Amino acid sequence: MKGRIKFLLHVLWTALLLPLSGCEKALNTKDYANWIKDTDNGLRAKKKVNHHTFDLQYLPAEYVWWQRNKMMTDKEKMREEVPAIEELQYYTLTLGIENDVVDFVDYGVQDHTEKQQKLYYFSYGFQQDLKLEVNGRLLPCALFHFERTLDLKSTRTFVLGFENDSKDTEETRLIIESGWLSAIPVKIKISKKNIPKLRL
């Protein structure tokens, strides 16, 4: 009887600890990068609205640090520098057209002048139309970079940063209010649950 109770307690204890262990797991750099980019894990979300495609990727502070320091294997340096990176929440937003039928910048424009207006808007004005919903608050986009590409990609990528005063928040929502993209706001949800640690 004692053995059976001991076994049942062991099963119960394991069941209670298993969900928590996901938060503490550490992955090597390759597995970590793959985990971050996997849409099943919640940090990356894709959406289609009015022939536009939206690909939103949340970038944890450790991932941002690793991207900047790929050749470095100094764990202590990472521990020192990650808190400064955590002052902002980082995202990349990639916009395209469904089935890549046309370049994102060319879509919906009538002539060269309108194309230049669209390019100017996405280079400078688009930032004002981006908000991050966190715990019921709407945060403005504090960091904005439009990545100009020299290749023939039909998509355009933006690096975004938002204030990060709620570091334990498990869910955020990007809200895009742009007449170039949709008549109504586009909302994309990101889940930050059980993010693994980076093992150098």
Image: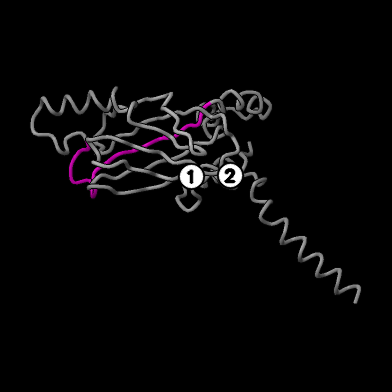
What's under tag 1, amino acid-wise? Leu
Which residue reaches farthest left?
111
Residue 133 on image: x %, y %: 45, 37
Magenta stretch encompasses residue 101: yes
Residue 31 on image: x %, y %: 55, 46
Which residue reaches farthest bottom?
1
Residue 166 on image: x %, y %: 57, 33
Q: Quadrant of residue 24?
A: top right
The residue at which mark 2 appears reads as 195
Magenta stretch encompasses residue 172: no
Please give the range of residues in magenta: 88-104
N-term-proximal mark, 2 vs 1: 1
> Which element type, helix, strand or loop, lies under badge 1?
loop
Can you say whether 167 is above or below 35 in the image? above
Q: Say few, some or many: other residues with alpha carbon within 10 Å of mark 2 (under 14 / 14 to 19 / 20 or more).
A: many
Tell me which residue sits at (64%, 47%) in the image. Answer: 23
Residue 9 on image: x %, y %: 82, 66
Q: Quadrant of residue 149?
A: top left
> Which element type, helix, strand or loop, lies under badge 2?
loop
Q: Quadrant of residue 82?
A: top right
What's under tag 2, amino acid-wise? Ile
Q: Say few, some or many: other residues with alpha carbon within 10 Å of mark 1 (under 14 / 14 to 19 / 20 or more).
A: many
Q: Are marks 2 and 1 in contact (CB under 8 Å)?
A: yes
158 displayed left or right of 115:
right
Can you say whether 136 is above or below 118 in the image? below
Q: CA distance from mark 2 to mark 1?
A: 9 Å
